[in-house]
Amino acid sequence: MTIRFLFPFLMIASWIFIALFAGLLPLHPDAIMLEKILIPPGEQAWLGYDDLGRSIAERLIMGARTSFMVAFCVVSISFVLGTIVGVMAAWFGGWWDKVTVLVIDIFIAFPGILLAIALSGLLGPGIMNAVVALSVVGWVGFARLARAQTLTMKHREHVIAAQALGTETVQIALIHILPLIIAPLVVEATFAIAGTVIAEASLSFLGLGVQPPNPSWGSMIRDGTRFMLVAPHMVLAPGMAILLVVLSINLLGDDLRDRMDIRSRRAKFNRKNTIQLFQAG
Amino acid sequence: MMLNYLGSRLFEALLVMLGVTTIVFMLIHVVPGDPVEVMLGESAQLADREALREALGLNLPLSTQWLNYVSGLLQLDLGTSLHSKRPVIEILSERIPATSILAGTSILIALIIALPLGVLAAVRKGSFWDTGAMAFSILGVAIPNFWMGPLLILVFSLWLGWLPVSGDDQILSLVLPALTLGTALAAILSRMIRSSLLEVLNEDYIRAANARGLSPTTIILKHGLKNAALPVVTILGLQLGALLAGAVITETVFSWPGIGQLTIESIQKRDYPVVQSCVLLISLTYVFVNLLTDLAYVFLDPRVSLSE
């Protein structure tokens, strides 16, 4: 157990724990206390108060809940939808596959979260619309991966045998294909969670995600930028939270990918020999 | 063979562009309820609503609306802004230079940071430089634009007082937004340069050059980096998407008057034709640049096989 694994693991574990149980704590993230406006971090409140005298620590905790819930919903929806579409495209092939590939290419042609920004802007601000907008963008990655993986599995002997035995298509997909393609999809899901955390915060930063007074890390940064001159802690705290969560997920994802990819391990070993040539010289 | 590939790649790009246009066209139809009602408010007169509906062409069947939209696009007619009543194409062309300058400077900054960092990390693999470069890369990916921006403002404008906070009145105000986008891109790029160069340094011709007694610098720059450049160019093309989407947020942070800020402004004003046109412009630029990088790849690398 290295620090490289332990640190992100603990970070993510506490993120999920806080997200799940924040509702049970006696928190008042929306309580306005005028006498505490813009108080910097100190002994009494270690993250200080915002422009309305609300506790930043408490808002950070409720913000963790928002970001986790959105990431969980979006990635679950994208995972299931994308996998179904991808497996179906590869399995049925022909025109069905061609059309799916074209649709995937079209969705990928929209840069980054631009489509999600436009979609949630036009649907109207709100957390539900943000989830819809991010899912519309999110399924594509899973579909493309699931399709590519299924194509390599389609002609395996055990699948052909199952077909010859007259097994139902749905059963083949669920029992004979899905377990073999799930590993890369899970790795993809890890990175998708990190991406969605940033995307949700971006939408909320632009005022398109979570609506006030509900806290989100993105909208906290948005509020903070107006008071940066006098209260930089309003911007620093939520940004640090996003950084730590995204960093940890990415580190865990890298770890997961390396464990599953035998090829990259071998490549690393091969490269070592050549590189030493240069380090010596 | 070459012409065949060119033809099919062009056809594919055209199909994707048409698809992108169709989705952007459909955006106005996902507005919940009646878009006309949203634009005019609930108290609007029935006659006014009908007039606006007709002006937008929303009373026509969907297929006719789509045909009108696409044929309008072909004549560079993007409609009229609901807010300022000016042609959208005019508004867009005022904003394009600002975004182009920002994107260009960001790519330049990214290359200036990522090239030496990536090369050092690959050549001195496992050293302090490598660890540092990869730490920078992992951090850079995890820091969102809308936090990097305020952080840079805090450090350079408030604490050091070197640069203005926002606006476009001075060339100096380009520095912080370009740095925000540039470092994010450099984070990904340095990682790509490192892995691409590592791949190349493993090739036989590098070993041969080494055996011929060429200096390490010559080998790395002339034989290594030159061959590692192509995949990096492709990645740069693909990352342009993240850069342009990031520009939407970064321009908002720094009040940089480009297409990105226009997108957010028109979303807030519910100026649908302008929103549609911004998204369309950014996306089509992205598709077009990636088409160019794909084609450049074929022309520049004789090893790319087109036998398929």
Image (cartoon, rainbow, N blue to C red):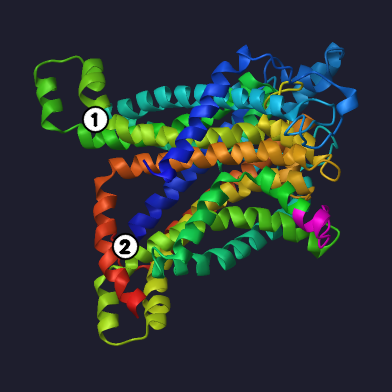
Q: In which quarter of the image is the C terminus of chain A?
A: bottom left
- Badge 1: residue crowd in 10 Å (few <14, some 14–19, many ≥20): few
Residue located at (65% from left, 57% from top): B103
> Looking at the picture, do discs 1 and 2 lie on one chain?
no
The single residue placed furthest to the bottom in the displayed view is B213
Q: Nearer the viewer, mark 1 or mark 2?
A: 1
User: In the image, A201: left or right of B207?
Assistant: right
Q: Which amino acid does label 2 sit on?
A: Val
Q: Looking at this view, is B11 or A88 the one in front?
A: A88
Q: What secondary structure is the stretch in magenta mostly built from?
A: loop
Quadrant in the rendering for residue B22: top right
**Mark 1 and mark 2: Cα distance apart in space:** 32 Å
Q: Is mark 1 on a helix, strand or loop?
A: helix
Q: In this view, does B216 lie to the left or right of A160?
A: right
Within-10-Å neighbours for mark 2: few <14, some 14–19, many 20+: few
Tell me the tag on residue A262: none
**Measuring 47% from the left and 61% from the top, which residue is drawn there?**
B233
Q: Which chain carries label 2?
A: B
Per the rendered image, the range of residues in magenta is B155-167
Looking at the image, which residue is at 37% across and 79% down? B219
Q: Where, by quadrant of the figure, is residue B104 drawn?
A: bottom right
Q: Please tell me the numbered disc located at residue B304.
A: 2
Q: Can residue B57 be seen in this view?
A: no
Residues B123 and B174: in front is B123
Circles 1 and 2, Cβ within 8 Å, touching? The answer is: no
Residue A9 included in the magenta stretch of the image: no
Query: To which residue does mark 1 refer?
Result: A180
From this view, report whether residue A10 is shown above or below residue B37: below
Residue A100 spot, x, y in % from top left = 39, 31
Whether residue A29 sits left or right of residue B202 in the image: it is right
Q: Quadrant of the N terminus of chain A?
A: top left
Q: Disc 1 marks which amino acid?
A: Leu
